[in-house]
Amino acid sequence: MIQTMTFKEMILQGIPHHLPSKKSRDDKFSHAPKRKDILTPAEKKLAIANALRYFPASWHAELIHEFVEELKLYGRIYMYRFMPDYEIYARPIHEYPAQSKQAAAIMLMIQNNLDPAVAQHPQELITYGGNGAVFQNWAQYLITMKYLAQIADTQTLHMYSGHPMGIFPSSIDAPRVVVTNGMMIPNYSKPEDWERYNAMGVTQYGQMTAGSYMYIGPQGIVHGTTITVMNAFRKKLGPGVSPNGKIFLTAGLGGMSGAQPKAGNIAGCITVCAEVNASAAIKRFEQGWVDKLTHTLDELIDIVKVAVSNKEVVSIAYVGNVIDVWERFDTENISVDLGSDQTSLHNPWAGGYYPVGLSFEEANEMMANDPAQFKTAVQASLRRHANAINKHTSKGTYFFDYGNAFLLEASRANADVMHDNHIDFKYPSYVQDILGPMCFDYGFGPFRWVCTSGSHDDLKRTDQIAATVLESMLANAPASIAQQLQDNITWINEAEKNKLVVGSKARILYADAEGRAKIAAAFNEAIGNGIITAPVVIGRDHHDVSGTDSPYRETSNIYDGSKFTADMSIHNVIGDSFRGATWVSIHNGGGVGWGEVSNGGFGLVLDGTDASKTKLESMLFYDVNNGIARRAWARNSGSLEAIEREMKRSPDLTVTMPNLVDEKLLQQIQ
Ligand SMILES: NC(=O)c1ccc[n+]([C@@H]2O[C@H](COP(=O)([O-])OP(=O)(O)OC[C@H]3O[C@@H](n4cnc5c(N)ncnc54)[C@H](O)[C@@H]3O)[C@@H](O)[C@H]2O)c1
């Protein structure tokens, strides 16, 4: 008789006691592109030895051929044979075998990141962004889940780029898990290095919320994109002017970029979004994330002209290359109000950006078989892309870089994107112009939470609690932050209606230090008195006021020269770890690419106790104000105001303030 194991037993088993039979990957899922064949024969042997060390020696003779084959076929060893037989999704917390509630919550968050309904390439353990990995292989997943089931509240699990190095004794106040992803010696942190060391199985690219177990599906990005598009229109059209019938032209209907049409609809404009991969575009259309789909430029032009004359709020996906749209809109004299781009230029040579003039299939073939020619084609395409955008901006389009390294890669390709001073780009990043001065400088950033009960009613209760807190803050808020509070009150009141939950019962909004702490404290109280039925995990995206040093994105509006330093993100993760975070993470790369950014995050499990209250107050205060302090020292006016206000509220806080120098004095220097 075949004994079937329960979910709990399978988790507790870790690596199976008996070698499971071989499994193939399932074609019904989207799979990661074949990675570059970069290893020398000696390095390939090392990669195989590295993979085999997870298993008993008696299995090696059988596994070795399979791993050699995986490395050859996919450029990585995923260990498909060890994919679990149970379904992976965020189960209610009580279903996880665990000694520690905190660890059970982390298991839920990990499984959410790998849920096929949530993850981009679930069988390659990739959550989003093409290469944002939770683990490098299935052995790491199995061992980590087992460790989390065993760990006590006086121990800490240390994760090295997906590899569970071990459980170490610590204390009840220490984080349960410490995560690093892709941390490299700085001189070995080029994209080629990622390809090499990831293929060897010794590092991984964790993106932001993939390798830190904090992804909540597309909701997070819909919110951030909505805030960006709304504020971009306010900038372009002036406050209070409706964006109805105005065009937002952009590209990408992938993991995060797929949020653009929905955000455009919430903001109230016409969104035109080009996507070269037909299946990605069709998926978004079938999910209802974009209203219309067309495969021809002629039809696109017809739809857009009607939408403009009727002042419609509509989103349109065009299956094809975005450069063709920019160029055709120019010859048709269609006026684009907002322009951006969300192709994956953080990953330009391995499928993030498709050159114009080649079909999707032709480009994929060239990428695998002739990487040098592909690189040349991408760079030529970027030059043409920039020329087309420049024609529109000369007619009044407001173009912003959407944190996908578009301007960075375009400049590296010698495209016409540099300012006359040859130092800056001619276009701002969305953080420089929009999110930085309007949100981050005041501490507003992507605060999020997950109800571990899995109960929709709990989520509704948290929405109500959060709305009440923000409304009470708005009553006494300074004018400089009233618009942000109001936008987020509107958002949270409509969140239920917008049906944005995919995977775990999660919610997001932007709040400042005071708002985050007040909302978290109110949740904690509601858990304590049973109004919310199980612990709530709080956290944030790394795309925030603090935590992330990213000179072309999160910290692109830092102008004192320090945007190329990474002290703030390192302080954030260390500071959060001893102030009560349940887990902390620090990543090399995230969003804009390997070597380009240092970013950190945290998760904190609220369980309704006084200990949770102390932790949330201390940790959230530091987590946000560390970033504001750094922005204030860089002389950002919003942050100077915000940190002065915080010092008045908090007598224990002393931040070093800059003395501003008179510009006229500086002009005397030759
Ligand atoms: N700053 C932010 O808030 C923010 C938000 C979202 C995304 N991003 C960045 O945007 C990028 C996209 O993220 P994603 O998760 O959607 O990645 P993704 O790889 O899932 O999607 C990108 C899509 O662009 C398409 N594409 C590539 N080249 C194209 C071209 N020339 N014309 C038309 N379509 C093309 C691809 O087929 C793909 O589907 C990343 O670099 C990410 O870091 C930043």
Image (cartoon, grey):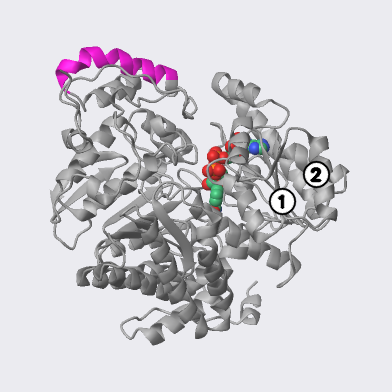
Question: Residue 411: x, y in percent?
Answer: 65, 45
Left/right placement of residue 609 relative to residue 38 reads left
Amino acid on which the number 1 mark rests in the picture: Val
| Magenta highlight on residue 60 | yes
Q: Which label was assigned to residue 40?
A: none
Left/right placement of residue 11 relative to residue 415 reads left
Q: Mark 2 points at which residue?
A: 303
**In the picture, residue 266 is in which quadrant?**
bottom right
Q: Mark 1 points at which residue?
A: 314
Q: Do the residues labelled 2 and 1 touch (CB within 8 Å)?
A: yes
Q: What element carries label 2?
A: helix
Q: Which of marks 2 and 1 is nearer the N terminus?
A: 2
| Magenta highlight on residue 415 | no
Category of crowding for the residue at label 2, using alpha-carbon neighbours closer than 10 angstroms: few (below 14), some (14–19), many (at least 20): some
Category of crowding for the residue at label 1, using alpha-carbon neighbours closer than 10 angstroms: few (below 14), some (14–19), many (at least 20): many
**In the picture, residue 361 is in which quadrant?**
top right
Instruction: Residue at the far right: name it.
Output: 332
Region in magenta: 56-73
